[in-house]
Image (spheres, rainbow, N blue to C red):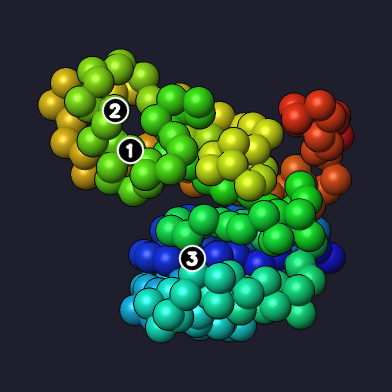
Amino acid sequence: MNKIAVLVSGTGTNLKALIEAIKNNEIKNGKISLVISSNKNAKAITIAKEANINTMVLDRKSFKLAHEFEEALFLALKEEEPNLIVMAGFLCIIPKKITDHFKNKIINIHPSLIPAFCGEGFYGLKVHEAVLKKGVKITGATVHFVNEIADGGPIILQKSVEVKQTDSPEILQKRVMEQAEWVILKKAVNYICLNRIYVKNNKTFITEE
C-alpha cells in the first residue's frame, strides 16, 4: 500500500476529492497517511481530521525565515517517507532540497493548461483572472511532477474546460475544479499507485494495465 502525503493551504477541495476517490476505490493501492498544512486556519485540516487522517500544521507565518519553514517541511516529509506527495492547493514553493530527495514522487495540480498561465505568481483566482483577461476560449487543469522550477516538472495529465463569455473568475474556477482538477488528479494518483507512470527525458509515459 502506497503512503500518500498531501500538502494543503486552503479549503481542501482537492483533498476531499482524493479522500472520496480512495473510499470509492477509484484510487487503488494508495492511502493518505498524512496531511500537512502551511496555514493553521485551513479548512483542509478539518476535512482530514473528519476522515481520521493524521495532520500536521507548519504555519508559514510562524516562521521568521523561509529556509526555517522549508527545513521543517523537509524533516516532516523525511520522517513520514511517503511513496507519493500531492500538492493540493499548497501555496508554497517546494525547495530543491525536497524535490531532489523525492524526485518524481511529488505531484501538483495546476488550474491551467501548462505552459499557459503558469509559473511564479500564477495561483488560485489569479490564474483564472489572467485567463479571462487574455480572452482565451479554452482553459483547464494540469497534473505534473514537481521539480525546482515552478510548474516546470514533467506533465502527467491535462484536461480542457470551456471558457464562457459570462464567466467571472470565481465561476470559471469552480468549473475548472469540478470538470478538470478533481477528474485528473485522482486519475494521476491512481496511475502512480499502480506503477503505471514513468519519466524519461523529462516526459511522462503511461503504461497499459
Please tell me whether residue 68 is drawn above or below residue 104 in the rendered image.
below
Q: Are marks 1 and 3 in contact (CB under 8 Å)?
A: no
Pointer 3: what residue?
8
- Residue 104 position, x and y percent, is 76, 47
Q: Is residue 19 left or right of residue 181?
A: right
Of label 1 and label 3, which has the lower sequence position? 3
Please tell me whether residue 179 is drawn above or below residue 93 in the rendered image.
above
Residue nearest the observer in this picture, 151 or 182: 151
Residue furthest left as drawn: 166
Please tell me whether residue 38 is drawn above or below residue 156 in the rendered image.
below
- Separation of residues labelled 1 and 3 (CA atoms): 18 Å
Residue nearest the observer in this picture, 77 or 98: 98
Asked whether the viewer can see residue 136, the reply is: yes
Residue in the picture at 29% in, 28% down = 131
Residue nearest the observer in this picture, 68 or 138: 68
Residue type at tag 1 = Val
Q: Are marks 1 and 2 in contact (CB under 8 Å)?
A: yes
Q: Is residue 179 left or right of residue 183?
A: left
Secondary structure at numbered mark 1: helix
Residue type at tag 2 = Val
Q: Are marks 2 and 3 in contact (CB under 8 Å)?
A: no
- Residue 100 position, x and y percent, is 76, 54
In the rendered structure, find residue 127 and report the number of the disc placed on it: 1
At label 3, counting other C-alpha atoms closer than 10 Å, the crowd grade (few under 14, some 14-19, many 20 or more) is many
Residue type at tag 3 = Val
Residue in the picture at 43% in, 25% down = 116
Residue in the picture at 27% in, 31% down = 130
Can you say which quadrant of the picture contains the C terminus? top right
Secondary structure at numbered mark 3: strand
Residue 134 lies in quadrant: top left
Secondary structure at numbered mark 2: helix
Pointer 2: what residue?
131
